[in-house]
Image (cartoon, rainbow, N blue to C red):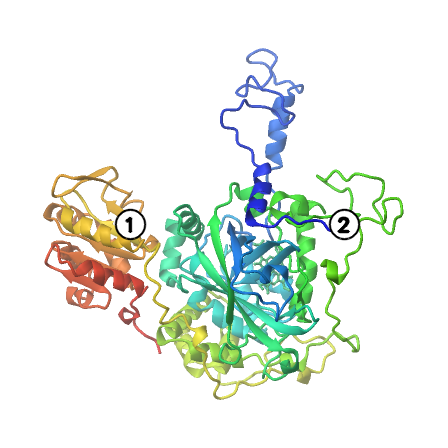
Amino acid sequence: MPKETNKTNTNDKLEELDQNREDSTGQFLTTNQGLRVSDDQNSLKAGPRGATLLEDFILREKITHFDHERIPERIVHARGAAAHGYFQVYESQSELTKAGFLQDSSLKTPVFVRFSTVAGSRGSSDLARDVRGFAVKFYTEEGNFDLVGNNMPVFFIQDAIKFPDLIHAVKPEPNNEIPQAASAHDTFWDFISLTPESMHMIMWTMSDRAIPRSYRMMEGFGVHTFRFINADGKSRFVKFHWKPLLGVHSVVWDEAQLISGRDPDFHRRDLWDAIEGGAYPEWELGVQIVEEEDEHKFDFDLLDSTKLIPEELVPVQRIGKMTLNRNPDNYFAETEQVAFHLGHLVPGLDFTNDPLLQGRLFSYTDTQLKRLGGPNFHEIPINRPIAPVHNGQRDGHMRQTINVGRTSYGPNAINGDSPAQAGQKEGGFTNYPERIDANKVRARSKSFMDHYNQAKLFWNSQSDTEKTHLIKALRFELGKVVVDDIRNRMLMHLAQVDATLAKGVAEGLGLDVPSSNDVQLNKSVPADANPADYQSVPAKATVGSSAALSMANPPKVGIKTRQVAILAADGVDASALNAMKEALSAEKAIIAIIAPRLGMLKTSTGETMKIDASLQTAASVLFDAVYVPGGKSSVKSLLQEDEAIRFVHEAFMHCKAIAATGEGVELLKAAATGGAEKLLDSDGVITSLDATDADVPSQFIEAIGQHRFWSREKKLV
Ligand code: HDE
């Protein structure tokens, strides 16, 4: 066979997308047939006041297209945002895998990444308490590889057959379609309280991981165990991780709820703005490798997606880096129409028998058929591989390719048996020949029945602040539950995880932890099964902890792209303001001047400065930190604005870095509840009565880098 040269680098994918771009700048308006339109303001009528004529094909084309603009939203992960970029491996991974995109450190493989929430509709808030999708499409020379993961390393259920139940339970209730994008309601907790296998995942979704500060500050996980296969055919198990170079950070729940009102597009905007501003988000790709012979050496099953491999047992090796450097041109064409699928695989990778993974392999193509309307969705520009496509598949809705020749079958002699099957040497995909010799059964492996130990591991690994947040999240969620039995069942499960956790939640609900130690709460037992086969393994008294599971003590990664609000009004101290702006800009933080009104600001020296937002449109929850410079008349004006006082108060409540100099300190005092001293003496609050104290900017920068000051919060554990 003549060897076809594949297109290779990121530019090729972008060029291909460019060919499909339409830019109407300087062009005449036309119909979809290219006919120039002279009047797009009036429909064709019998007289100026007359009836509209059916003959008006221009009107009908326009309205018909409009009527068909919406496609079904994704049943899960409907709300998302995406970006283009590239991936580069650090060094050849040929020992582990023959996958082409993991061989050559000079090769940039184009990627398209879509982040999402799971439960909400397309128009829901970015800040819902929820798992985040983290789906990466690699356009490799050997075909597309989709790593369709989440920002949490485990999942709620062990078998795909339960997915529709899980999603029905979490989605708005069917009678009144309430609540939107929230798990805090009866049906979700009813299902969870009867499904012990969910307990580990519940720890994650009730933690602050479920309310990230930014998509750019989330980890990603492939969740399932996959296989790497090298050129010798040797297979090893692999778990995939994405490690963000900006560290892992979250907001607090009160803040999340406020952001949902102030800016429901917070995450979408943050990703867009960072890329537009040239602060390209980066993640390292990590792998945990387990040798075939070690498959059974753990006290959990590698095929069970409710379990992770603690990094202490198998370290994460960072093998490459992904950079997102271009926003989509068109949300619908790219972000909405992108179609991910675990079955988009390249040689050197393969699946395991994880029953969740196996079910997903069916679901993704099926859902695209419905959502994108037919079998040709791979021809939509965003889904097209850069590798050439040749096969006998033909026709169907919206077919774009004009296949030439007489043959669409094989074997054929008319076209010299083309397209020909590719042997392994020619890059043909072959499945890993895993031996399977078993009875056909509907059953769950006993090795999947440990539902509490890793939930316990997660709990043990959290800082006291994280534990407090977890208890509060459960109090919130179960507090919204109306049916009492559900709360009691959940407390029984939580007692299996940890006594302090259960007690903390019970106290907030005004309940006692039920005395029954009923680990038999597993109601996901088939009709004729022996209940003993489904009995949960009781939690061990002590389970270790794993540092990687906590977000406390984040690595110091500076304050690049952190949003800092500067509260000011006319008469603001020019030298203090400028010194702070200079210091923050040098660290690549993003600064916004917030004033009582929009327009231009006059500083103490008469300099004019653009105001970025007024106190009516800005809010502290949209920023990482706040600075109040001095200047008598500036601070006097701010003191008259409730929003300014609330701004500082909220930033303090949410444990953010706050700085004030000169008269600016007065605003902090006004914002203090429980005594000004308490606020001024708190960690992360930097004040100086010296209006131009040269130490303040550096102390403030150091404080912003800490992300939050949890010592201000009341601990529950
Ligand atoms: Fe998905 N999932 N999923 N999922 N999933 C979809 O496919 C499904 C699961 C994930 O940005 C759907 O194109 C089943 C785990 C992401 O476009 C659908 C099961 C993980 C996205 C589907 C799971 C994911 C989806 C809906 C249980 C993390 C968004 C729209 C067996 C490893 C991709 C679509 C995007 C989307 C099915 C469980 C991640 C219905 C049946 C576990 C990131 O096919």
Residue type pointed to by label 2: Pro
Can residue 357 be seen here? The reply is yes
Left or right: 524 in relation to 706: right
Answer with mark 2 or mark 1, whichever residue precedes in sequence.
2
Task: Determine the residue positioned at 41% across, 65% down.
Answer: 248
Classify 10 Å Cα crowding around label 1: few (below 14), some (14-19), many (20 and above).
Answer: many
The image quadrant of residue 102 is bottom right
**Viewport quadrant of the C terminus:** bottom left
Task: Determine the residue positioned at 56% across, 62% down.
Answer: 149
Task: From this view, report whether residue 468 is shown above or below residue 326.
Answer: below
Give how far across and how far down residue 125 sits, in percent.
46, 52
The image quadrant of residue 12 is top right
Which residue is disc 1 drawn over? 591
Q: Residue furthest bottom?
A: 541
Left or right: 378 in relation to 113: right
Q: CA distance from mark 2 to mark 1?
A: 58 Å
Q: Nearer the viewer, residue 711 or 425?
A: 425
Left or right: 564 in relation to 163: left
Give how far across and how far down residue 186 sits, in percent.
52, 65
Task: Determine the residue positioned at 35% across, 63% down.
Answer: 557
Q: Are marks 2 and 1 in contact (CB under 8 Å)?
A: no
Q: Which mark is residue 2?
A: 2
Classify mark 2: helix, strand or loop: loop
Picture quarter with ligand 1: bottom right
